[in-house]
Image: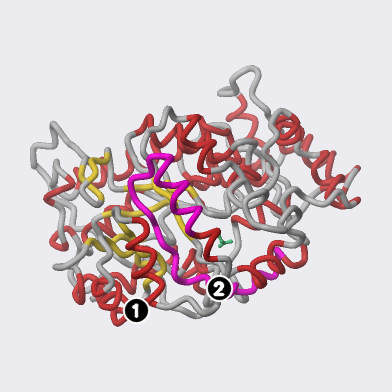
Amino acid sequence: MRSGEGIFQARKQHFKPGTNVVTAQSLQQARDLFPFLFTPETRPVPQVITNIEDLRILAEQRVPRMFYDYADSGSWTESTYRANTTDFAPIKFRQRVAVNMEGRSTASEMIGQPVAMPVAIAPTGLTGMQHADGEILAARAAKKFGVPFTLSTMSICSIEDIAAATDRHPFWFQLYVMRDRDFIERLIDRAKAANCSALVLTLDLQVLGQRHKDLKNGLSAPPKLTVPNILNMMTKPRWCLGMLGTKRHGFGNIVGHVKGVENMGSLSEWTAKQFDPRLSWADVEWIKKRWAGKLIIKGIIDAEDAKLAVASGADAVIVSNHGGRQLDGAESSIRALPSIVAAVGSQIEVHLDSGIRSGQDVLKAIALGAKGTYIGRAMLYGLGAMGEAGVTKALEIIHKELDISMAFCGHTQLLTVDKSILLPGSFPV
Ligand code: GLV
């Protein structure tokens, strides 16, 4: 037996009956028999889920390739996508000892709303393709955990679906501005009617960054029934069963609500036609007036734009490069954060999205002045891996890492955390 297999056998002792277990050996046999069904990344399922990477590996096995790739990719060379996570690593904590660590709390507020921890669910497109009814499941998990859930315009479940499935618990709605302004007005009104408590306006997707994998995979929702897609879906029985059990397979906020849109064809083509490349700050003013509630502007990565967002009357900005999916070569979010906090942090709440994969990342962002953070991929991996329970697991993992790391840094309340927990010279300024 090779040493890797030895570890694997030892871990088998912890298997719970009934879980979907793939051994290294059976995986290799299946690979030898049906090489076309596998990709080089396929790995044995982690037996005990302890971190977000475990959820990612599980999601990679359970979600059809085209949707897994959609979540786990950036634009062009993916350099910004990678930098979003790797730029957290050089930031070091100052460990403190002999400080009373009892009675800890990660509770705080985002835009005046109480949160169990300052980690909202980010708006992610096609969430209901990672798992049947994905947006509903993620919204329920967020509600139970006490953190905000943000629904994307490009979701599979509709605004009304989320409201109905969560007993009208307030959630946030993310808006993309499209050429059809009547449709945008109706979307805003639908979000109000559904009890949404914040509008998250995304400003960095007037045009789409090229994501090679999506083009090669022919990404669409529902997926086209081509031979490679069917063969790949045959290896994802849970996913297929889930999809057979729901009627939600298209873009719930759009199909049937935009004149002439019944079939969106390829997502990249549709986006190129419908998203408004002329979007300007004057539109932000118009949207703010129509919405007349809390407004969060997403997609700010430059201090000058953050100042314009303050002038627009927004309540918060999200420092974000869209998870490295738009301008490849743009600065990572965590590196951009300090200059934006310095420019506008005294006037507006600054939040951070893109790159958060652990509670330690959250703690670093909070120490550098963010009042809130967002998880997109970390949530999607949980969802693809285990549905609602997986999203809850992702939130629990992040919460535990945040709570314990905060304690090691000598704090019992997240509200007291600031830059002083970081090692001078190790963080961007
Ligand atoms: C938009 O939601 C995207 O695909 O990044």
Cα separation between marks 2 and 1: 21 Å
Q: Residues within 10 Å of mark 2 (few under 14, many from 20)?
A: some
Residue identified by numbered label 1: 302
Q: Residues within 10 Å of mark 1 (few under 14, many from 20)?
A: some
Rendered location of residue 352, percent (x, y): 34, 61
Closer-to-camera residue (193/325): 193
The magenta region covers 185-214
Labels in figure, total: 2
Quick check: is 248 in the magenta stretch? no
Q: Amino acid at mark 1?
A: Asp
Of the four image quadrants, the one with ligand 1 is: bottom right
Residue identified by numbered label 2: 276
Secondary structure of the residue carrying tag 1 is: loop
Q: Which mark is residue 193?
A: none
Closer-to-camera residue (400/140): 140
Q: Residue at x 60, y 41 (%)?
A: 384
